[in-house]
Image (cartoon, rainbow, N blue to C red):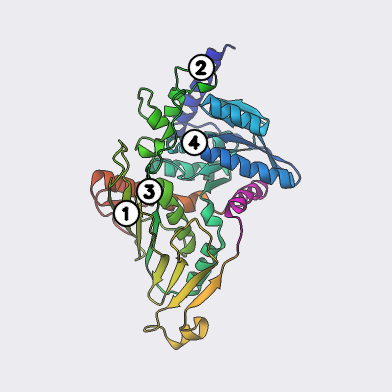
Amino acid sequence: MSESNRRHFLMSTTALGLAGRTLARTRPAQGRVIGANDRINLGVIGMGGRGSYLARVFAKIGAQNNSCQIVAVCDVYQKRLNAAKEAHKCDGYLDYREVLNRNDVDAVIIATPDHWHARMALEAMDRGKDVYLEKPMCHTIEEVRQLINTVRETKRVLQVGSQTTSGDQWWKAKKLIADGAIGPMIMSQGSYHRNSREGEWNWKIDPEAGPDKSGENYIDWKMWLGPAPKRPWDPDRFFRFRKYWDYSGGIATDLFFHVAAPLNICWNRPQYPYKVMAGGTISVFKDGREVPDTFHLIAEYAQGHTVVLTSSMANSQHIPGLIRGHLGTIIMVEHGQFERPTEYIILRPERRVIDEEYKAKFGDQEVKVPVEQKDVMITHATNFLDCIRTRQKPTLDVETAACAQVLITMAVHSYREGRILYFDEKAFKVVGKPPRLA
């Protein structure tokens, strides 16, 4: 089969598979049964900065305990692809479907721009692959629903790649909340702040690369765009995609996911927001970007509590990350940086309202609860590999991650539309007026 015919065949079969998602779908493929001593064969799709880092992490784990190996890599930029093939001594492809079509690939790591996440993950699970899916897990609310349904149907393992959730502090807080240490939840807060001269996401552009170039400078721009609106080649969009709505939600989806996901682990159970409002502006970096460099959201939950998140890419001062309750407060990240290690969390009782029963159980003084120190990235990746063998639910499973994803995606739409939005959980869709609560 010629190269052009092979690509046409791959595109046709993929189109049929996606159409089948809304019509009659064929039975999903079954993955290989992996024994305790078998190596897990991994394919990595997207070999930019994040994908290359993840590949190194999994390769390091595999080298230490023989649990996995990278057998295929994929990127639409030939230079990145060549470097990844050389680094991991494996096969490489410009077309991700060639990785998914390999019967020897047990699982894939997806680290592409956000607008490709859901489609690749859905196709991978339909082909019997388990998936490590970088955050954000997808780009739209409908994709959230599709991912949940497909994980349930195919029974594949899907770990969302917000490694912060593997930190011990969230699980310590979860137990305290479940034990009644803060009473009814009132409000959770967090922030994510950075600052730089050049502006966030203004990564280096390779002026020699493009779709009309040859050799290692070639970029398959049409494939990169994929489900996004068609546009002529634009190196700023390719190399700095997080600045544009077609491919990213900016601060909300890149950074707030690392706050919203662990909060959903802390709470008694993951929860979808009921009402979301967001605002922001391009305060400093007026460089043609579409996403704001300063952003904030307020979300209300039907269970009676609120989330407030703030962020700026033009100022680096954080606020403490904490969860407030009527009887006490848990200070999760005193320094405010959710991805940085912390040695302890703080339980601070509300001394004016606690009773003797509370004092007997938790005391009436501030308590520092020690946190186990560990490499959360290695822990998160290892958890994914372990779950491939045991078929257990991973740390950041699709349903927990979905609650964070709905929040941040709604915040993006609230900002762009300039209005308050509501989530109808029963219908699983965003609406413009309050839905009837059960």
Up/down of 272 relative to 13, above or below = below
Report if residue 134 lies within the magenta region: no
Q: Secondary structure at mark 2?
A: loop
The Cα atoms of the two marked residues, 2 and 3, are separated by 36 Å
Q: Amino acid at mark 3?
A: Ala
Q: Which mark is residue 112?
A: 4
- Please give left or right for residue 202 compared with residue 344 in the image: left
The Cα atoms of the two marked residues, 2 and 4, are separated by 22 Å
Q: Secondary structure at mark 4?
A: loop
Location of residue 133 in the rendering, given as x and y in whole percent from the top left corner? 52, 42
Location of residue 119 in the rendering, given as x and y in whole percent from the top left corner? 47, 34
Magenta span covers which residues? 373-393
Task: Name the residue beneath numbered marker 1.
Answer: 296
| 1 and 2 marks in contact (CB < 8 Å) | no
Q: Secondary structure at mark 3?
A: helix
The Cα atoms of the two marked residues, 1 and 3, are separated by 9 Å
Task: Name the residue beneath numbered marker 2.
Answer: 214
Label 2 Cα crowd, 10 Å radius (few <14 / some 14-19 / many 20+): few
Q: Which mark is residue 41?
A: none
Quadrant including the N terminus: top right
| 4 and 3 marks in contact (CB < 8 Å) | no
The disc, 4 or 1, on the residue closer to the chain's N-terminal end is: 4
Q: Which mark is residue 252?
A: 3
The disc, 2 or 4, on the residue closer to the chain's N-terminal end is: 4
Q: Amino acid at mark 4?
A: Thr
The Cα atoms of the two marked residues, 4 and 3, are separated by 17 Å
Q: Is residue 226 visible?
A: no
Q: Secondary structure at mark 1?
A: strand
Up/down of 163 relative to 219, above or below = below
Q: Nearer the viewer, mark 2 or mark 3?
A: 2
Location of residue 264 in the rendering, given as x and y in whole percent from the top left corner? 45, 58
